[in-house]
Amino acid sequence: MRNTLPLICVMLLFYFVSCKKEKASSSDSVTNQQAAFMVSTALASNANGLISIKNDIYNYTKNLATNSAGCGVPDISAAARQEPANAAIDYNYAMGYQYILNCTGATKDSLSTNVNYNGSFEATGLTAMNSGTYTITLTGLADPTNYFLNGTYQNSGTYTTTDGSNLAGNYNTSITLNNYTILKSNGNTTGGTADITVSGDVKNKSAFSYSGTLTFKSGGIALLVLGTQKYNVNLTTAEVTPTS
């Protein structure tokens, strides 16, 4: 008995320590960086995000003389959109578009765009089924250099993390654009800001909510400040890189 009792105690101690470590390493909520990735997939063109819609609006505006149904007349269309071959992010979306050219007399003032969509995507670290709306107004039709986008993007759906944290639940993303600037000559992003919120829950665990700002830069990068953390977001690939 003197020999076996210490061994049993050691085994019990190891069991309780192991359980404590396992509990400490489990995830109960979406981290700041996971929330940042939710934002980046809502933005990146490779995930059919905001940049894809920006490109649609730019291409429509570039051929406004032939595309438009006329001042004040809705131009409505629908499309199915999937990822290109060998893409890192898989997606499948049904898209609905409404464009309205706003005029004062014969002068073209702005273009109102409403986009509705639903579908899903699978990225490394995150999958989601979601739906959403874009309500965006393009101005600068008479500007020699730039177009400007202002408006909102809202999406909601369900998510599952695939980065080892094994979280799942509901989420919502909201982006409000402030003079998001597009170069007329090629459609590239050159500036502007946005206000961001991302919130939701982890099933049977907890709720999460983060808010912050985006600053769009040239070169396909945006600076995301989410809470107290900063990230560079690649607007093509959705890659999120912490920065100081």
Image: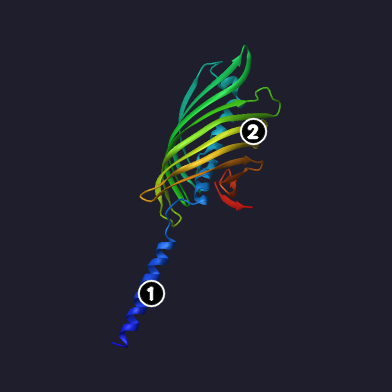
Q: What residue do we see at 60% from left, 20% from top?
A: 65
Q: Is residue 144 above or below residue 175?
A: above
Label 2: element kind: strand
Residue under circle 1? 14
Can residue 119 be seen in this snapshot?
no
Q: Using residue 21 as the reference point, say whether residue 110 is left or right of it.
A: right
The numbered disc on residue 154 is none
Type of amino acid at the residue the image marks with label 2: Ile
Where residue 49 sits: x, y (%)?
52, 39
On the image, the x and y values in percent for residue 174 come to 50, 37
Residue that mark 2 sits on: 182
Label 1 is placed on what type of residue? Phe
> Residue 13's x, y, as percent?
37, 75
Seen from this angle, which residue lies furthest right?
Answer: 144
Q: Which mark is nearer the camera, 1 or 2?
A: 1
Residue nearer the viewer, 172 or 14 = 14
